[in-house]
Amino acid sequence: SRLIDKAHCGSTLASLLHCYYQLYGKRCAADLVTAFSKLFTHVLLLSLGLSHRRRLINQCRAQAGQKALQKIFSLSEDSNEQILINEFAKG
């Protein structure tokens, strides 16, 4: 399987980290831990960022037409939908 369990990465005997420590020493093992931490943080932040960006884009798409009509007809931002429809129909 392609999954890496925490037992494979942790400080247990025969884990990836333990083998790396045995082969390359504590300095390199510490660098490996730092790299894993950065990788997981990046993946988590990337996923959260993607979700947030999608939400913002959907909000912008939902409001784009309304904002454009408000600007074109010099209406206030709190203009309701019926006012926008009436102004659009007049135009």
Image (cartoon, rainbow, N blue to C red):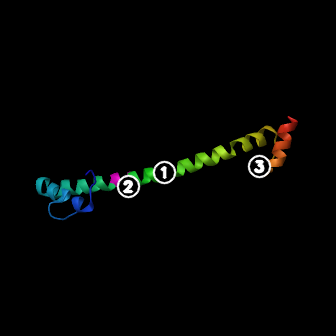
On whether residue 72 falls in the magenta region, the answer is no
Where 7 falls versus 62 (above or below)? below
Q: Position of residue 10 (x, y in %)?
A: 23, 62
Contact, CB < 8 Å: mark 1 with mark 3? no
Rounded to the nearest angstrom, the CA distance separating label 1 from label 2 is 12 Å
Which quadrant of the view contains residue 74?
A: top right
Q: Position of residue 29 (x, y in %)?
A: 20, 56
Q: Secondary structure at mark 1?
A: helix
Instruction: Write down the residue under mark 1.
Output: 49
Q: Which mark is residue 3?
A: none
The overriding secondary structure of the stretch rendered in magenta is helix
Q: Secondary structure at mark 3?
A: loop
Label 2 Cα crowd, 10 Å radius (few <14 / some 14-19 / many 20+): few
Residue at image point 78% right, 43% down: 70
| First to last magenta residue range | 38-42
In this rendering, position of residue 73 left or right of residue 27: right
Residue at image point 17% right, 58% down: 26
Label 3 Cα crowd, 10 Å radius (few <14 / some 14-19 / many 20+): few
Name the residue type under label 3.
Glu
Earlier in the chain: of badge 1 and badge 2, it is 2
> Which residue ends up furthest to the top in the rendered image?
91
Q: Which mark is residue 41?
A: 2
Residue at image point 78% right, 37% down: 72
Name the residue type under label 2.
Thr
Instruction: Write down the residue under mark 3.
Output: 77
Earlier in the chain: of badge 3 and badge 2, it is 2
Name the residue type under label 1.
Gly
